[in-house]
Image (cartoon, rainbow, N blue to C red):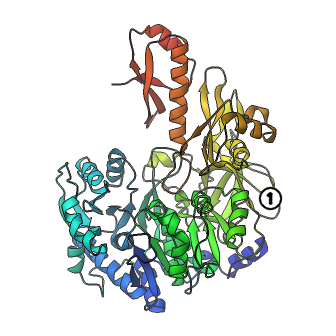
Amino acid sequence: MGFATIADRNAIENEMPWEARDVPTTMFEFLSNAREKHGTRPAVSFQLLSDRRAPAETFTWAEIVGKVTQAANLFRSLGIGEGDVVAFLLPNCSETVITLLGGMVAGIVNPINPLLEPDQISAILRETNAKVLVTLKAFPKSDVAQKAAEAVDHAPNVRHVLEVDLLRYLTGPKKWIVPFLRPKTQVEHTAKVRDFAALLEQQPGDRLTFSDSKADRVAAYFHTGGTTGTPKVAQHLYSGMIYNGWLGDRMLFDDSDNVLCPLPLFHVFAVHPVLMSMIASGAHVIFPTPQGYRGDGVFDNFWKLVERWKVTFVIGVPTAFAALMQRPVDADISSLDKAFSGSAPLPVELYNRFEATTGVEVIEGYGLTEATCLVAINPVEGNKKIGSVGIPFPHTEVKILRHTADGPIECETDEVGEICIDNPGVYAGSTYTEADKNHELFHHDVYLRTGDLGRIDRDGYLWITGRAKDLIIRGGHNIDPAIIEEALAGHPAVAFAGAIGQPDSFAGELPCAYIELVDGGKASVSDLMDFIRPRITERAAVPKYLEVLPELPKTAVGKVFKPELRKMAIARVFNAALKAEGVAAEVSEVVEDKKRGLVAKLERRGDVDEAALGHLLGNFTTPWDWAS
């Protein structure tokens, strides 16, 4: 089914060039194949609440393709052609799957993270020139409808807003009460607002009302959701999505699998490695609660959900696995065979703890939005080098390159450089919708520069050593933050750690770290410093500042969100410097500027000597100005 060594992987690749394989060309053809092979089998299940006895909705493959066909027909009737965009701002639910796939069939789908602020959402809507937005009808304890209204008010290109009402998932007294508790939307916009379900039922589900082009094309826009701040929009081709599905079918899943995926469908991890693999293999995916892992009671009921659905495969991220290890296995999980972790490096101790607790190995993989996701995996059946991300997938070429004034130079075995990749998921030259974002993004016009630092060992395993843009540069000395984070992660009281460079008037940056402790964990700053000093062999990398927070800021898929940590550090360092010099000013906030990066905004607290202020803050490389 999979591969155990680099030789096995090469043998799979040599079976046939990717371009010559008999794989579907379009999403509708891909889905039609699933209906023909697995029509009566369960495809997608969703439950609104996390309780193992909560009502759930399941669609077979025939039913899901019928609903997707209706959605594609609906979007075409609203003026969506192959080059037009359907955006959605939705939590997980059945309608999200239908919108996602239907948008790909009719035109270009643009999933948007509902946790973003309205100004970020509107910026994405304008960048993608979306004509249709599918979002939630106002619902208690959710601000998605309000965010959508405010965003559309600043995105006049959106002509139609289609609302999904979660009320249909409720039963009993809650169904009667919710209509009285709906929050009011304060912002009015010019887009036409209609009910998604009602419009959907007006469309045929047995055929497309338009011709499927049978050609490869851009069919999805995914905004980046990593740790680098302002989102960019990546373009995904049918071929890249189908390649991800082919990999899942060939390496991971078959039609007997029940896959529990509490990850958001606005993120590539849930869409390409998971949902596309379900289409290719005929496996069954279960989405618990609209918020996935963030949903009420999901962690507490997780093992019971595994028992309920006879789950064979769990999809997660390191933060989720760490949270699960703080809860007892209180159900029959004998059906569980494997777990897949992505999005961020998996600590060795967490891998060992999960296997010891559940008897299940965690398979670690590596991918990125810009490559339509999948790049490498620790072999399912072979030697897992824990700490590495395994062997590149078949038809994926990984090069470790060092950028020089004379051009890229390929690194030797185990030499660290930038990870650069080429595979069917890489849209060479046109990764981002904004052309200027593609400048210097490729080496030799072929290999996507990931921005990740890494090395390939003699057995062909890929190791991530850090991010090029996350390097802490102390007086010209490059410090990999992973050195600090790994040392802190070894402390039994530490759940998560994020190391960054804080501004310094002399060295440019000094290493600092922020920590979140495990539930009930106790460790002082001095305890942690005493623990890590002997474990950080690079003296310059020992943090000059360390702070324990109740919770670290994280992205929707569990990565530590370093821009927020940088903002905290800038404000702290600047305010300390201003106070020490007696300058009557204070940092009110740190904001992200598209051209200048992070900018400190100052407010006056009395009379300010402008010259003295300029001299003081001029010693830092971080820009600043007065708050308006």
| Towards the viewer: 12 or 206 | 206
| Towards the viewer: 25 or 155 | 155
- Mark 1 closeness class: few <14, some 14–19, many ≥20 residues within 10 Å: some
Residue beneath the point at 67% across and 82% down:
1
Residue beneath the point at 28% across and 54% down:
148
In which image quadrant can residue 44 be found?
bottom left
Dot 1 amino acid type: Asp
Residue 488 is situated, as x and y percent measured from the top left of the image, at 70, 44
In the rendered view, tell whether residue 153 sits above or below residue 576.
below
| Towards the viewer: 608 or 417 | 608
Residue beneath the point at 57% across and 18% down:
619
In the rendered view, tell whether residue 566 sits above or below residue 385.
above
In which image quadrant can residue 243 be found?
bottom right
In which image quadrant can residue 424 be found?
bottom right
Residue 402 is situated, as x and y percent measured from the top left of the image, at 71, 46
**Residue 408 shows in this picture:** no
Helix, strand or loop at label 1? It is: loop
Residue 463 is situated, as x and y percent measured from the top left of the image, at 73, 56
Residue 593 is situated, as x and y percent measured from the top left of the image, at 43, 35
Q: Quadrant of the C terminus?
A: top left
The residue that mark 1 highlights is 457
